[in-house]
Amino acid sequence: MSLLGCVLGFALTYAVIAAVHKLPSGTIPRAEAVHVRWTVVLILAGIATMTTLLSATFPALLVARTDLQPALQVASRGVATRSVSNQDVVRATSQRGTLAGGG
């Protein structure tokens, strides 16, 4: 998804720059100086990458420290006639995986 957004963003950028260069002279001051600076693109890509990694890593580390045993014991005590089934364990571990994945 993010790669598609990046490609579409670059396509839009180049289309707008081409449109600016086709405008009559004097419409936009210094229109010929409008271009993509790759150093800025690389710096912003680095910032986006670090933000993505940090926002995904910290929640995953917090969830990884969570012990599932007490949570499952509390759930089993809530219903006296029912024991913890395999389905409950699968549900709890899949929720843990969803949280660890950031989504």
Image: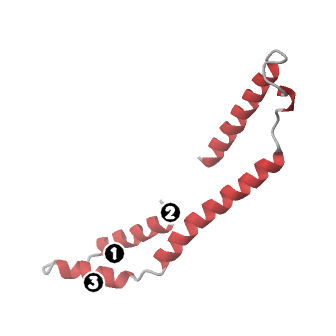
Q: Which residue is mark 1?
A: 89
Colouring scheme, one of rainbow, by chain, secondary structure, one colour: secondary structure
Q: Is residue 102 above or below residue 68?
A: above
The mark nearer the N terminus, 2 or 1, is: 1
> Which of the two marks, 3 or 2, is nearer to us in this view?
2
Residue 57 placement (x, y as % from top left): 57, 69
Q: Nearer the viewer, residue 67 or 26?
A: 26
Residue that appears at 60% across and 66% down: 54
At label 2, the amino acid type is Gly
Q: Would you say 7 lies left or right of 31 here?
A: left
In the structure shown, which secondary structural element does the residue marked by tag 1 occupy? helix
Q: CA distance from mark 2 to mark 1?
A: 20 Å
Q: CA distance from mark 3 to mark 1?
A: 11 Å
Residue that appears at 49% across and 76% down: 62
Residue 19 appears in which quarter of the rendering?
Answer: top right
Q: Which residue is mark 2?
A: 102
In the structure shown, which secondary structural element does the residue marked by tag 3 occupy? helix
Q: Would you say 53 lies left or right of 93 here?
A: right
Residue 50 appears in which quarter of the rendering?
Answer: bottom right
